[in-house]
Image (cartoon, rainbow, N blue to C red):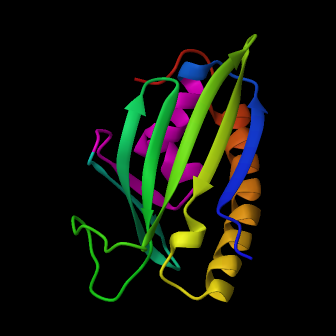
Amino acid sequence: MVPDRVEREILIEAPPDIVWSVITEAEHVGRWFSDSAAIDLRPGGELILTWDEHGAVYWRVERIDPPHFVSFRWLRPMQGLSSGVEPPEGNSTLVEFSLDAEGEATRLRVVESGFRELAGSEQENAKDAEEHSRGWELELGELRDYVSAHVRGPAPR
């Protein structure tokens, strides 16, 4: 059976405004998550993640409530689908980032859902969910390490 959602959370030793910057500003996202990023941070805006070896992945901003919540629609690669094109039904998952202050730190929770509704076979969708489960664990570790090593003082402007 295909799990419908992947959930991960971590505690990051930085206040929510700093963590918010690191997950929503291209200069940061392109350093901990991909090789480069472009972000239009408004509902309907686009997030383009690019890896030198794998090409680009497109996300669409769904909802934003700074500095506590942002969600993106992760568009699956398709022949002929490019930037700015509305994806067909069954071709995306929803990624939600929730940030909560815990003292001087931030509890970051990521939920990616919609794997059961993807247009692939049950086996393909289960594999996708498993890869994303492992991927979020790795990426959130990289995010925590990035904040610890590179982000100091007040949130970058």
Left or right, 119 with respect to 109, comes to left
Q: Whole-percent x and y of residue 7? A: 71, 50
In which quarter of the view is residue 56 placed?
Answer: bottom left
Q: Residue at x 42, y 73 (%)?
A: 91
Q: Residue at x 44, y 74 (%)?
A: 76
Q: Whole-percent x and y of residue 75? A: 41, 67
Q: Is residue 34 above or below residue 14?
A: below
In which quarter of the view is residue 50 placed?
Answer: bottom left
Q: Is residue 95 above or below residue 88?
A: above
- Foreground of the two, 64 or 35: 64
- Foreground of the two, 24 or 35: 24
Q: Whole-percent x and y of residue 12? A: 74, 30
Left or right, 120 with respect to 4, comes to left
- Per the rendered image, the range of residues in magenta is 18-43
**Farthest residue, direction front:** 1
| Quadrant in the picture for the C terminus | top left
Left or right, 21 with respect to 115, comes to left
Please tell me whether residue 114 belongs to the stretch shown in magenta: no
Q: Is residue 95 above or below residue 2?
A: above
